[in-house]
Image (cartoon, rainbow, N blue to C red):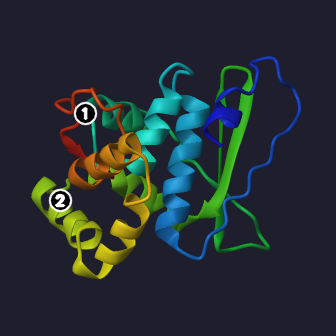
């Protein structure tokens, strides 16, 4: 999704319909967030933003600022389909494109809450560590990491330690904000 959605040509005139469907509302919200980034963020930064929003435990403050701007610019005005009372539709224009999201009001509200609700970095880190570094997953982690080549092992261990998807020599200092 990262490359294909972001690289839709500007002069593309056909309709594109994307269905985000998941039993888990959190996954649906994150997918909607990624889609909005793909459609609204600058093409040069959108793939990197999407990568870190999906995988990294912390993100640079600049990513949250751009994401907050995108989500806050969603129109408040919604239309409701008479036959589908549970769904709302948000329509807006971006340049020459007309875009629309049809979702539940709860999901849209949860998306906006992601940006406005402050997150405690310590609580986020402890929650991640409890899941990623639990004793129950030790066999799985060792089974996956042991047969890997040296560079894959180093990358996997670095991801387990930092929670960031970065090249081996990349600095982690900018990744200060908990990922929504």
Q: Name the residue nearer the viewer: 168 or 175.
A: 168
> Where does the image place residue 151, in percent across and percent down from the top left?
38, 40
Position of 13 with respect to 152 (left or right) is right
Q: Quadrant of residue 124?
A: bottom left
Q: Identify the secondary structure beneath mark 1.
A: helix
Q: Is residue 83 above or below residue 119?
A: below
Label 1: which residue?
61
Q: Residue at x 51, y 29 (%)?
A: 46
Which residue occupies the foreground of this view, 140 or 130? 140
The residue identified by callout 2 is 125
Instruction: Locate the N terminus by quadrant.
Output: top right
Residue 94 location, x and y as percent? 64, 26
Identify which residue is drawn at 61% across, 33% down: 39
Residue 92 image position (x, y, % from top left): 64, 37
State the residue at coordinates (28%, 27%). 170
Would you identify the image quadrant in which residue 82 lies?
bottom right
Task: Tell me, yes or no, if residue 42 can be seen here.
Answer: yes
Upstream in sequence: badge 2 or badge 1: 1
**Marks 2 and 1 in Cβ contact (< 8 Å):** no
């Amino acid at each position: 999704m990262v490359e294909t959605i972001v690289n839709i040509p500007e002069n593309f005139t056909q309709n594109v319909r994307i269905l985000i469907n998941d039993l888990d509302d959190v996954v649906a919200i994150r997918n909607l967030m990624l889609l909005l980034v793909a459609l609204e963020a600058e093409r040069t930064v959108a793939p990197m933003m999407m990568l870190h929003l999906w995988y990294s435990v912390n993100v640079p403050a600049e990513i949250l600022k751009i994401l907050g701007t995108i989500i806050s610019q969603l129109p408040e005005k919604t239309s409701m389909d008479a036959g589908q009372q549970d769904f709302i539709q948000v329509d807006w224009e971006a340049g020459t494109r007309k875009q629309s999201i049809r979702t539940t009001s709860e999901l849209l509200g949860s998306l906006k809450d992601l940006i406005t609700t402050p997150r405690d970095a310590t609580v986020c880190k402890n929650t991640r560590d409890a899941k990623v570094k639990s004793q129950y997953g030790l066999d799985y982690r060792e089974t996956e990491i042991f047969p890997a080549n040296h560079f894959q092992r180093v990358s996997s261990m670095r991801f387990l330690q930092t929670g960031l998807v970065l090249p081996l020599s990349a600095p982690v200092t900018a990744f200060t904000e908990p990922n929504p």
